[in-house]
Amino acid sequence: MLAPVWKRQWRDHPLRRRVDILEAWALLALAAVLSLGAPTAGAYAARSAYAHDLVVATDQESSRRQVPAVVVRRSPPADISVGETGRGDTVRALVRWTAPEGTPARGVAQVPAGLERGERTHVWLDSRGRVTEPPLSHEQIVAGAVAIGAYTTAAGVGAAAAAGLTVRRVAGRRRMAEWEREWQWVGPSWRRHDA
């Protein structure tokens, strides 16, 4: 149904109005935005997010360090409901380690699930010696960039689709108003011929 309507808007015929031409050009522009603009914006957003996260990861790698630690209390088993989220094999547990100045330190950190008391593991510390998350991995950076690119592309497609619907609605209202005005002018003379 759209193809015949589209062709009709471009061809010269007695029912074509100026609004039909404007609608056709607006929909053509929106199609260009939809096919070129949205993917380009998504790619740019993904590239920007990737570059930003690389800088963040480099900063994290320079300000964080991994130290050996010992589990103070047995760590709980893995939560099977977490499963595929990537955090199912680690749990929070109390650990101890030796600070750089040689003093003992304790804290709660993410450790592999099921470690017994006294088993060794590693924890990440920030520049102040507090337990923190490990630096962003390359896989996390790529996943974040892909997600941001996909969301940006989807937002562009949604905006273009909403704009297209708005153009169609406004053009339809304008077209109906023009037809109504013309019918008010032509209608009375037509009725006289029927009588």
Image: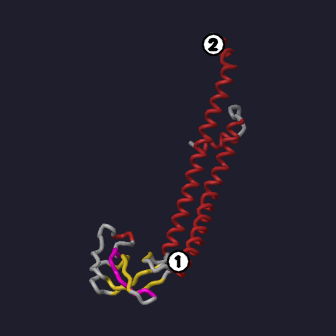
Which SS class for mark 1?
A: helix
Q: Judge the density around disc 2: few (<14), some (14-19), many (≥20) Cα neighbours within 10 Å.
A: few
Numbered tag placed on residue 51 in the rendering = none
Q: Estimate the x, y position of residue 70 in percent, counting from the top left.
A: 34, 85
Q: Is residue 24 above or below residue 92?
A: above
Numbered tag placed on residue 194 in the rendering = 2
| Part of the protein shown in magenta | 90-100
Instruction: Say which residue appears at 52% left-offset and 77% top-offset.
Output: 60
Q: Quadrant of the N terminus?
A: top right
Instruction: Say which residue appears at 49% left-offset and 77% top-offset.
Output: 135
Instruction: Say which residue appears at 60% left-offset and 46% top-offset.
Output: 163
**Which dot, 1 or 2, sits closer to the camera?**
1
Residue placed under numbered mark 1 in the picture? 60
Instruction: Determine whether label 1 and label 2 are within 8 Å by CB.
Output: no
Q: Is residue 188 above or below residue 145?
A: above
Q: Disc 1 to disc 2, how far (Cα)?
A: 85 Å
Q: Residue furthest bottom?
A: 102
Q: Quadrant of the C terminus?
A: top right
User: Is residue 27 left or right of 135 when viewed as pictured?
Assistant: right
107 vs 173, nearest the viewer:
107
User: Is residue 9 left or right of 107 when viewed as pictured?
Assistant: right
Residue 146 on the magenta span: no
Residue 93 on the magenta span: yes
| Residue type pointed to by label 1 | Gln
Q: Estimate the x, y position of residue 81 in percent, counting from the top left.
A: 30, 67
Which SS class for mark 2?
A: helix
